[in-house]
Image (cartoon, rainbow, N blue to C red):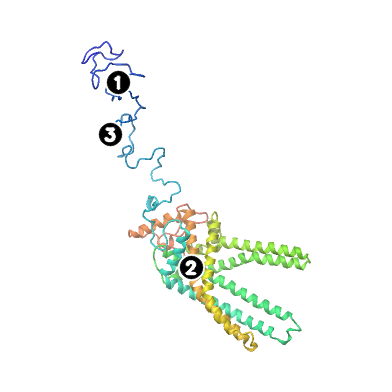
Amino acid sequence: MSDGHGSSPDTPPGWASDQPPSYGGPAPWAAPGPGGTPPPGSPQQPHGQQPGPYGQQPYGTPPGPYGQQPHGQQPGPYGQQPGSYGQQPYGQQPGSYGQQPYGQQPGPYGYAAPSYGGPPALKPGVIPLRPLTLGDIYNGAVQFIRGNPAATLGLSAAVTLIAQAISLAIQIPALGVFVDTALSPNLASDPSQLLGAVSAFLATTALGVIFQMIAIVVLSGMLTSVLGSAVFGESISIGQAWRLTSNRILPLLGLAILQVIMVFGFMVAAIALIVLLGVVGAPGELIALASFVLIIGGIVGGVFVYTKLSLAGPVIVLERAGVFTAINRSFRLVKGDFWRVFGILLLTAIVTGVIGFAVGVPFSLVGNLFADPTDLTTVQSGLAVSLIVSGLGGIISGTITNPFSAGVTALLYTDRRMRAEAFDLVLQTAATDRQRGVHGTAPGDLWHPSHAAGGHPHGYGYPPHGPGAWPQ
């Protein structure tokens, strides 16, 4: 052993005879291996401590200078030190660059969705530009009405007034025939006259309901164009809404008629089968059982078709699609989320029904005051006045509830596109560009399905280029 340069009898075979002194003081040389000392220049292990795996910092050993990697350790990402801010916790695999954690919605321009207490999503208009909750949909429908009172309540009042006027014009003559027949002295000799009058009155009432349903479908389509601008925080007038939807009225009418036929077709078929069983003389027990099954089946079938067709109106207006294309697209959008769409539509029908009932009850009570059954000479005029007053209540309640229902349906359509086609990314990009003063595709043109981030649906080509390039 030598304390300085020179040969040593303890020098391992193959090593140079002129060796420097050991680090930290004299120590015998030993061949590398188990129980041996490390080669020259290596940091010494504390006394009694076994060396750890290659490249691992021993317990209790202070780290090296800032920015210096431990011996044998691979450097991390550029500028990042091991154990510094941004390092993955133990046992967690790092994701790829820009990758979102599982189940987390992406934020604008690649930023992750904010965690609890973080900044909210972009909200340039009535809704945040992300997949919507029930609260978002209802709040957006209310803000949609408050932000566009003239276009929403004004259009709703006009269309509801026309629908109620036509319905009353159909019902009042049939009601007069019914009252005259009921008070006729010849009724005792021919009771079938009363049955015919009742049937005619019920038929006209059903026709009035169908006409009002058609009017609501058309109104919902017109209000959808207003909502398409309200998503970006823009308000439009009644004239602008009419110009946006004037060439969509005929497709909306066609959709409304087909929707009525398809929804009520189940009930009509069920009633026709029940009547057929009675005509052929089937047993009463069989007719009763068949009636129960067929009526329940007709209701279920009608509700199913109504739910699947519920998004066709917004497709016709916002995507400029034809009737059958809109029906097909509505079926695809509802697919995979049927029960959620059905539940929201059912809850909305209950809410609007309660509001409409609360608004219409006072008018119905006032109308009943004119219908005095004890005075046969004024029964017909009293019932007519009662219908008119009740219709006035229907106009007021419809003016309030129809825009809300239309807003919910249009926002459901928007939510389904966000979830199925990543349409929220398209809206976020457009909203951010507009905030920066970059005006590219017009807001009305963004709704074409070719803008969906999820791909190009079958049957659609590329969108027209330039703002306002849709075919008129």
**Mark 1 — residue?**
39
Mark earlier in primary sequence (3, 1)? 1
Front residue of 290 and 61: 61
Secondary structure of the residue carrying tag 3 is loop
Residue furthest toward the top?
9
Quadrant housing residue 349: bottom right
Determine whether 406 is above or below 96 in the image.
below
Q: Residues within 10 Å of mark 3 (few under 14, many from 20)?
A: few
Mark earlier in primary sequence (1, 2)? 1
Q: Residues within 10 Å of mark 1 (few under 14, many from 20)?
A: few
Q: Amino acid at mark 3?
A: Gln
Determine whether 212 is above or below 296 in the image.
below
Quadrant housing residue 37: top left
Front residue of 462 and 95: 95
Secondary structure of the residue carrying tag 1 is loop
Residue 282's disc is none
Count of number-bearing discs: 3
Residue furthest toward the left?
4
Mark earlier in primary sequence (3, 2)? 3
Residue 25: x percent and y percent?
23, 20
Residue 68's disc is 3
Residue 404's disc is 2
Say whether residue 369 is left or right of residue 274. Answer: left
Say whether residue 288 is left or right of residue 59. Answer: right
Q: Amino acid at mark 1?
A: Pro
